[in-house]
Image: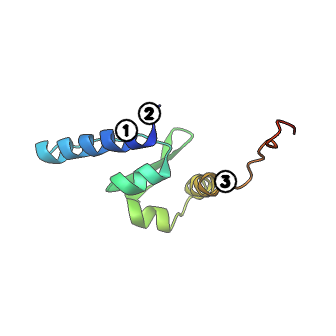
Amino acid sequence: MLDAPLQRTLLELLYDLAADRDITLLHITHDVAQAATFADEVAVLSDGEIVERGPVGETLASADHEATRTLLSAASALSEGAGVERPAADGGG
């Protein structure tokens, strides 16, 4: 639960360290933007099983499995603020 700039800095440090040491970094996230920004490959799980896996750009661009499409749709809605009902400025509903 870090703020966005600190989160990005930490991820950049981790990925730089992994590259410098030639080690694999397993990054588990529900944040599609993080996966798209940092990962080389992505695996999507549904009910505890990998349902889709591949290069991040290709996999996210042409999602074959419903779980991947649902994840992408939800991420898109969140980034656009779609479907979010906000209370009125005066505190009323």
- For this orientation, the residue located farthest to the front is 90
Amino acid beneath label 1: Leu
Q: Residue furthest right?
A: 93
- Position of residue 27 relative to residue 62, above or below, is above
Q: From the viewer's perspective, tell me whether residue 16 is left or right of residue 68.
A: left
Q: Which residue is mark 2?
A: 2
Q: Is residue 80 shown above or below 2?
A: below
Callout 3: SS: loop
Earlier-in-chain disc, 3 versus 2: 2
* Residue shown at 70% from the left, 56% from the top: 82
Label 1 sits on a secondary structure element that is helix
- Give the number of the disc on residue 6: 1
Count of numbered tags: 3
Which one is earlier in the sequence, the residue at label 1 or at label 3?
1
For the point 41% across and 51% down, the residue is 35
Q: How packed is label 3: few (under 14 Cα within 10 Å), some, or many (20 or more)?
A: few
Quarter containing the C terminus: top right
Amino acid type, residue under disc 2 in the picture: Leu
Proximity of marks 2 and 1: CB atoms separated by less than 8 Å: yes
Q: CA distance from mark 2 to mark 1?
A: 6 Å
| Marker disc for residue 62 | none
Tell me the distance, in whole angstroms, between the alpha carbons under discs 3 and 2. 21 Å
Residue 2, horizontal then vertical, whole percent: 44, 33
The residue labelled by disc 3 is 81
